[in-house]
Image: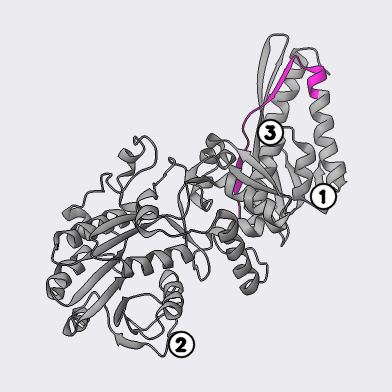
Amino acid sequence: MEKILILGGTQFIGRVFLEVLEKKYPNSSVTLFNRGKTNTNLFSHFNKIKGDRYSDDIFKITEEYWDVIIDFSCYLPENLTVLLPRLKNKVGRYIFISTVAVYDFEKATLEKGNVTEKFELLPYTSEMQGGNLLEYYGNKKAECERILNSHIEIDSIILRPSIVYGRYNIYERIYYWLYRLKNKPVALLPENGDVYRSYTFVDDLAEMIIKAMEIKEHHSTYNATSFEPASLKNILEEIKASNNYTTNLISIPREYVVENNVAKYRIPMWHIHSNYKFSNKKILKDFNINFHSIKDSFSKTIQYYEEIRKNDEGNIGLSIAHENAILFGYLLDQDEFETAKNILSPNCKYIIDEEILIGPEAILGSYEKNMIEGHKKLDVLEWGQSRVEVLNEQEFLIHFTDFLTHENKKFTHKCSQKITTNVDGLIEKIEHQFNEKEDLALFDFYKSVGIN
């Protein structure tokens, strides 16, 4: 390869690719076209063209011939509409980094097996043209592909990665879980992590791009995923086994996730919608690449984070404090008192009336004792689904509902407890919230069924 032009490419995927490219083709002439705002200290020995691709600056690249153009940064179809006609006879191959988000997922869920490259893409309308990029990301990328494919005079390859992970990733999806597996005795896992997704290890994607540069005339599109679709549970268990982590992953049902707005705060790598599984058989056949295993790719990712992070919580998804509040409510609903001890600080205080209990053993022992006594004196005692209300970053209200039945009479009792977490996210104080109306109604029920 003599002349290679990179559009974008100094932040995450492009940065890894450029490192691989330097080793594979050290004598190539590489030029970077970007705004010069991200990691400007990197790759200083490469040629640079500074400009905004969404302005007339982009036409600077049409003034000479390129053996390969690799486009990491195009999100707006209109840009390709004006650029590609001017690249006729100016490029040997155009490699476009797209995304599996181009597929029409509502129809893709009907696909038997994994979605292939032939599956239907999202539409693109005039309304979407001026719409929010995040909202119409998949639609805009799909239209970019259609525009590129319409220029049959340009030899192009389109790569559709899925969730990309690995070094230099600015989105801490993986770190969210690594921190928990390394530091927490228990962690919340919606639906037991039984949602299957396809993933792309960034080192594998870099090798795919290299192969896309090397392969002979080859106008085609590929799902650029590293291994067969895997569930989040399988991935986390693989990481646990490889690193001797012992975190207990607590499965909570979908309805609890919805009721407590967990999806609003995002659980990285878990999605409230469907399984999205993509076939990588075509790229394996054509490119003949040995992709990393789940174990090896995540081991490399862990090593990267160990080098750059100070074992801090991270900045994505549920906070540890919020997660522990949700876990506390859910574990009490399930009578999982022993497990709940793990999210209380050693000196946690439980304040109810004038009584103060201190420590996980005493506190959870009192919950269990009340449960046992309740079952003994009532014909039926059942717990409803707790609900967590966020007060601030460290304080939460947990609302409980109890269903009591005795002597064919039924009563629904509601109560709340305020919990306060410490700087590590552990619960350090629990305060029973008195509700005179509820307490009097409970007293009257007991009296009506002959319980003192």
- Give the labeled residue for mark 2: 41
**Front label number (1 vs 2):** 2
Between disc 1 and disc 3, whose residue precedes?
3
CA gap, disc 1 to disc 3? 20 Å
Crowd rating for badge 3 (residues with CA inside 10 Å; few <14, some 14–19, many 20+)? some
On the picture, is 222 further left or further right than 89?
right
Crowd rating for badge 2 (residues with CA inside 10 Å; few <14, some 14–19, many 20+)? few
Which amino acid, by three-letter code, is at mark 2? Asn
User: What is the x, y in percent for residue 407?
Assistant: 73, 9
Which amino acid, by three-letter code, is at mark 1? Lys
Secondary structure state at the residue bearing disc 1: strand
Picture mark count: 3
**Which numbered disc covers residue 333?**
3
Q: How is the image coloured?
A: one colour
129 lies above or below 35: above
Q: Nearer the viewer, residue 116 or 445?
A: 116
- Which residue is at 47% across, 42% downward? 272
User: What is the x, y in percent for residue 105?
Assistant: 34, 43
- Which residue is at 76% across, 12% downward? 449
Crowd rating for badge 1 (residues with CA inside 10 Å; few <14, some 14–19, many 20+)? many
**Front label number (2 vs 3):** 2
347 lies above or below 373: below
Secondary structure state at the residue bearing disc 3: helix
Between disc 1 and disc 2, whose residue precedes?
2
**Which numbered disc covers residue 349?**
1
